Image (cartoon, helix red, strand yellow):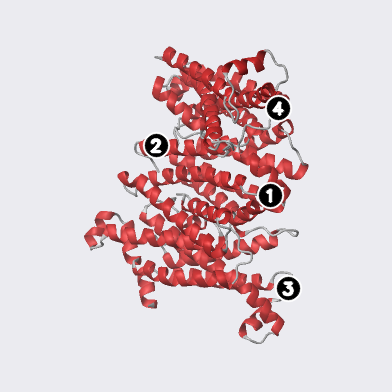
Amino acid sequence: MRTLVLVASLAALVAVVLLSIGFGSNRLSLGEVLHALFAYDGSYNDVVVRDDRLPRTVLGLLVGMALGLAGSLMQAITRNPVAEPGLLGINHGAAVAIVLGSTVFSLTSPDQYIWFAFAGALVGTTLVAVIGGTRGATSPLRLVLAGVAIQAVFIGINQAMQMINTHNLQAMRFWLVGSLINRNLDQLSVLLPFFVAGVVIAVVLARALNALALGEDTARGLGANPALVRAAGMVAVGLLSAAATAACGPIAFVGLMIPHVVRSLIGQDERWVMLLSALLGPVLLLGCDILGRVAASPAEIQVGVMTDVVGGIAFVIVARRLKAVRR
Amino acid sequence: MTALVRRESGLDRRSTVVVAALVLVTSALVVLSVGTGDYEMSPGEVLATLAGSGTKAQYLVVMGRLPRVLVAILVGAALALAGAIFQTVTRNPLGSPDVIGFTTGSATGGIVTLLFFGGGPGVVSLGALAGGLVTALVVMALCAPHGLLSSRLVLLGIAVSAVLGGVNAYLLVKANLEAAAEAVGWLVGDLSGRDWTYFVPLAVVMAVLVPIVFANGRALRMLEMGDDTAIGIGVDVPRVRLILVLVAVALVAAATAATGPLQFIALAAPQLARRMTRLPGPNLVASAFVGATLVVAADYVGQRLLESSLLPAGVVAAALGGVYLLWLLLRRRA
């Protein structure tokens, strides 16, 4: 079953990448896409693919992977089905810090944002850890409410800064929506080490997280230090969320939905949940992005709006299904 | 009527003192707010003008600023009453209209009218009203199979808010800068420029709704003890619940129409009232006064906090309300 899901996920990933490169306001055949990628000659189609769709697709891959992985990590650490970096204010923490950076220091690109994003993500992560309690099995309601409260404060600060500075509103209202466009690969390469660091920590932790799922004592018996595992896991969540937010603005729900889908398919083995979440995160994100391009063609709906709508609906389904929600 | 209010809202001696203190604080804030601005007036001058012995210029200034504070008072009371009703009906201290998505729905309705129909206070109010009502119906319909008492109501409200939040962000991106700035200004919840044309419709709506709330005050307190107890005492539970929820939604919508969505007043006011009066139950009168005080205070603080620019009341309310909710969550675990 796992192998089957793995193969299907990889196939879906390849399909969605090809669609993301081939689909747009001017549609390209597979041959034209391959031509642009491997026999670049500067024609209009080639430029569209190289300078617009390719960076966009790479960004979608990286961010989707980061969000899917961060979501599965958070759900494993907190053992709470609604844990997610977007819903719990981590991405918004990063966003507030970036808005602050752009207001006060006139920063404009992701490589400048990133340090602000980290500071903000750190604040968000700490708040979630303190309020939600990372000791596992807090009530879903409590965690979501903590997220609502944190977001309200962050959004209030953002709105205040936007009202004070209209120039900032112009730049930030586009960025705060969450979008994959207008990024180039050079800017992204600055973020790459942070994505990699997050992934590496996640991989190292995978076995220990599995042990943790069996309970604190069992985990200790198996040689894992629960407190250390949780702390390291939250660091990875922070790294991945900050890099994702710095790259394309706050995007919610990808980290919530994907691990749910994965668990319903293959069960609780955290190693597999993490692997498949990392593969399916980009499928969802790029899928939403493509949907946004098609739905409003020739204009576009930003991917952050699409994930809010799709994710909100998925969250409605999750909320209706949760058994015995505790207060 | 006074006796009725006293009996139905559980006003004991402590509550009376609390309400009296809130009235004093609010009055002081009103005098301060009215005296603050480009043309400064001392509290004595404000009081003298209100009593009818100020100069003509002073009278004009006071009449210019008074409606703003009065709108703040009504909006605060409306939100607080709605919050008290929702928290009692859902028997969940977190089941307040802003947490369960009505505020975001009103905002969506407001932006849509602002961006597509050009705005004007009347039209935006209708949009906010429609948006809030539709969202309320959707959330309650989604929750219906489990009953409104379930904590799912809160989760579903948050989910629906998230969808609408995305829609709101999209609408802002689609608009031109000028319209977007206006919409952001409205979205954040603001009292600036609120004159008598805002006050009068709000006052009329509340004159209709508030008596309905108090007429059902006793039934509301019975609801909190559980449906079975309430039915045993002879309360028509489904009917009372429906009426009260509809009235509460209308109160939120009316308040949102006047100022834009002010966050967390509906959540915090009833709980603060409960702490101050140390009484269980909805504490309707005390809640309304706490709400009024909070909004007037948020508006005053927003005007005085920064030298260079005026912060809207909504920003102050959201930041303080969020901090309050966090504090509440931390306490609940302890």
> Which is more N-terminal, label 2 or label 4?
4
Of residue A32 and residue B169, the one placed in the foreground of this image is A32
Disc 1 + disc 3, Cβ < 8 Å: no
Q: Amino acid at mark 2?
A: Ile
* Residue at the limit of the structure toward the bottom, as seen here: B53
The chain that hosts pointer 1 is: A
User: Label 1: few (<14), some or many (≥20) within 10 Å?
Assistant: some
Which residue corresponds to mark 3? B40
> Residue sitting at 35 percent across and 71 percent down?
B7
For marks 1 and 2, give the CA distance: 35 Å
In the picture, measured across the screen, residue A100 lies left or right of residue A289, that is right
Residue B217 visible from this viewpoint: yes
Query: Mark 1 and mark 3, same subunit?
Result: no
Indicate which disc residue A317 carries. Answer: 2
Residue B156 pos. (x, y %): 42, 43
The residue tagged 4 is A184
